[in-house]
Image (cartoon, helix red, strand yellow):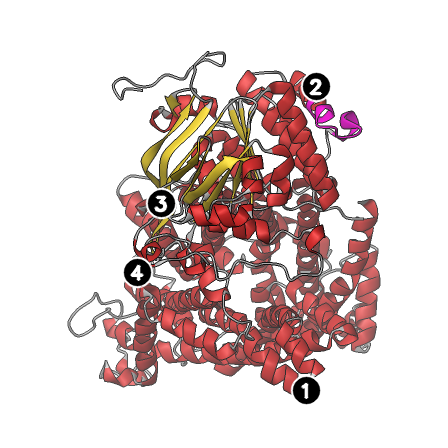
Amino acid sequence: MSDTIAPSARRRKHGGGTAKPPKAASLWSDAWHDLRRRPLFIGSAVLIAVILVIAVFPGLFTSVDPLNAASCELAKARQPMSGAHFFGTDNLGCDVYARTLYGARNSIVVGLSTTIVTAVVGGLFGLVAGFKGGAVDTLFSRITEIFFAIPSILGALLILAVFRTGNVWTVTLALAVLAWPMTFRIMRAAVITAKSQDYVVAARALGASAPRIMFRHILPNAVAPVIVVSTINLGTFIAAEAGLSFLGVGLRSPDISWGLMISDARERFLEAPAPLLFPALFLSLTVLAFIMLGDAVRDALDPKLR
Amino acid sequence: MKKTSTPVLPARTAPGDGPLLAVDDLHVEFATRQGVVKAVNGVSYSLNPGETLAVLGESGSGKSVTAQAIMGILDMPPARIPRGEIRFRGTDLLRLPEDQRAQVRGQRISMIFQDALSALNPVFTVGWQISEMFRVHRGMSRRDATKKAVELMDRVRIPAARQRVNDYPHQFSGGMRQRIMIAMAIALDPEVLIADEPTTALDVTVQAQIMELLAELQRESNMGLILITHDLGVVADVADKIAVMYGGRIVENALVHDIYRSPAHPYTKGLLDSIPRVDLKGQELYAIKGMPPNLLDMPQGCAFHPRCPYRQDDCVTDAPPLYEVGPTRGSACHYWREVFDDSRR
Amino acid sequence: MGRYIIRRLIQAIPVLLGATLLIYAIVFALPGDPIAALAGEKRMDPNIVAILRDQYHLNDPFIVQYWYYLTGLFRGDFGKTFAGVPVTDLMAGKFQVTINLAATALVLEAVIGIGLGLYAALRRGRPADSLILASTLVLISIPTLVTGFVLQLLLGVKLKTAGVDLFPIAGVTEGWRSYLLPGFVLAGVSIAYLTRLTRTSLAETLRADYIRTAVAKGLPRRRVVGRHALRNALIPLVTFIGADLGALMGGAVITETIFNLPGIGQQLFSSVYLREQSVVVGIVTVLVLVYILANLVVDLLYAVLDPRIRYE
């Protein structure tokens, strides 16, 4: 309820000119211009940059190689935080700091690959269903309803049980199978809205081909909500990977995963909380960073708030 | 009115020799991110019992903001009233403590809005919404209040009121919804009724019926009516006097027949010339050139000068005061005489 | 209304069939032999194995097995485990735990989420509002996994050593109090979302024209907000809370594991490893039903709350 005058004053400024088709490019450059000045965006972008550097070059921050079993000494299990072990050691005497840093990579890989797969699959199906309408749309929509009805963690748990082994790719697959319908729904709705816009109708009247209308005119204008949701989902996927690994069906040792670390530290958690709390902290910060980024991007792209 | 003690709200029957309602040098501004918007800049008008004042102007002219200031329903902040008085039976409402102000709002001065569909609460029945006035302000029981609501619906001529009292707003037609708004507004016999574009959203035939109803209700109760509109056509038959607003100021005020005969401000003249007339059929319709002023960046001098065919150099630098054109009328134009003479020809 | 409900239920049939088929197929594809798993280490008499395989239709093709299962389901028969226990009996106790957990979470979600959201909306732009908004962002970002353990540590160890014993931190031995902490953990993310939704919804409603009308009627602010605005702002919240029931029940497995609650999540977990397909499919089927019914109830509630919506 900030100000009653501002919206109408602004509308006059924007809408007063000649009626040009909304250029997707200007939406993005406007959004970018807007984003650069949002503390939420800057904060999350910096945080994500740091996490990405850790994920790609964990060796920059620690000389311990946790992938080498020799780095753990059972005799030094559950040591407190010290100069030698910043975050202490875990039940097997491994360095928690090094393991936490090395765990970033798998989280990021699962998060990114699941996001890409769901965005491409869900987005493509959504584009086709929304554009074609009719029987194609009905068929796809019915199928997604089935997926929506299945609880996603339980579903992923079942799929992973089929594979027997858990690694980043099976986890990605399990998560993506259950998550693509959400992207589908969002893309479909955006496409149906874009389809009835004047500039699309005009392009159609001018005899543009269906693929051209779909990819040149509709997609650039419908992709914004998908990007917003994908960014937020990236964080959710990272949390889901941790959850599945914690349950014992996601990544398995010797892979390093924050969820797995939490699970391993669980037994002696109440007496030695550090081996559980540090991966938990990194996990939370990573999820927070992506959800914040998604929030900032949504605020910048949402035409209702512009 | 001396500014010594806290003002007290006068009784309904207070004899008082002044006008029922007088707006005096009212200023309203809004703080926005882009700067301060001066929506109302020194507006004055007055209203007597049984009188109808039409406030005319395009959107952004400040006519609705003035009305909302009278009602005390502006969101403050961002709105601010740096100067001016709104005297109701001699008492300045702006200096009245909020609890007394609340006694005026809805009970003694009430208001109806442009779009009755959005102005009525969609999830309550119309009967509930009308009877709420009696329940909240008069402490009536639900049953008695509903009975009153049915009476009011009868009075604003809603057919089968008794059956429809439990219907929801969306189940009525546009005209009927506006009647419900009117019923709600007159429920407690207000002394002033402000109608903000009451017919804009309606069909032409329904517009006439609503205006007729308002005029009739006014005759019955002798209330003062402020009719806010951008449509000169609506005004002619019902109004006693007219105040024309432009850029947050009153640019011309006059009795209704005077203004139609001979406008004394180029803006009013432009408005009158742009009404389609049967005797001028076939000629191109006049239109005022240019755009309404930007409230964030008002032109220097007379706000109307960028669009004015009578503009001289001093219009760009000096804002005209309200010149006295006659005993009951004024015009804020340096060259009102030329306009006046032109329009009599 | 009645016809609408029937139509909706008919529309739900393909969803139910599709979901059970999908789950049945996944369980069918699970590695390992259930009868062998039943026997464990010791060797079974081949004759008994043959009888068991026949009894559970394990020699039939997939689609025939599914058909047997489905026809049983429509008679209300969820089948038997390989040990001969009716799946319905097995599920009843587990679902009781999960329903208690989800219901506690739902109540906490509604009370805390709506309460905080209203408070924030009425103080928009002030410090309290910013604080609530920032906390929701953090709450959304912290995975259940983390909130669960952190609260367990705080309440179970730190406060207990300080002499404050608020909630039990594991198990279900202390009645409804056992569910408070896990319920809160399960509801965490939903609380944050609901707070934001409530805030937006009320703030948007307060900008509506009919609120201006209510103010112009001279109503006290308490009534304008508490009656006119709230009644409208509530409508999207009901949808959110209702649709969340299914999500909470289906997402309870991690919370159940952390707090050692013997609910369906844990049951599903062990049944997957025993390849108890009737149990696995049964649990998912019930969850799908809960999802479908919850959505139906929400749609009907919508019509009750918003008179503009009428279903025929």
- Mark 3 closeness class: few <14, some 14–19, many ≥20 residues within 10 Å: many
The magenta-colored residue range is: B152-164
Q: Is residue B158 magenta?
A: yes
Q: Secondary structure at mark 4?
A: loop
> Which of pointers 3 and 2 lies earlier in the amino acid sequence?
3
Task: Tell me if label 4 and label 3 are in contact, CB under 8 Å.
Answer: no
Residue at the disc numbered 1: A208
- In the picture, measured across the screen, residue B198 lies left or right of residue A279, that is right
* Chain of residue at mark 4: A
Residue at the disc numbered 3: B29
Q: CA distance from mark 1 to mark 2?
A: 64 Å
Q: Residue at x 58, y 66 (%)?
A: A152
| Corner quadrant of residue A223 | bottom right
> Which of pointers 1 and 4 lies earlier in the amino acid sequence?
1
Residue at the disc numbered 2: B147
For the residue pair B217 and A82, the one nearer the viewer reads as B217
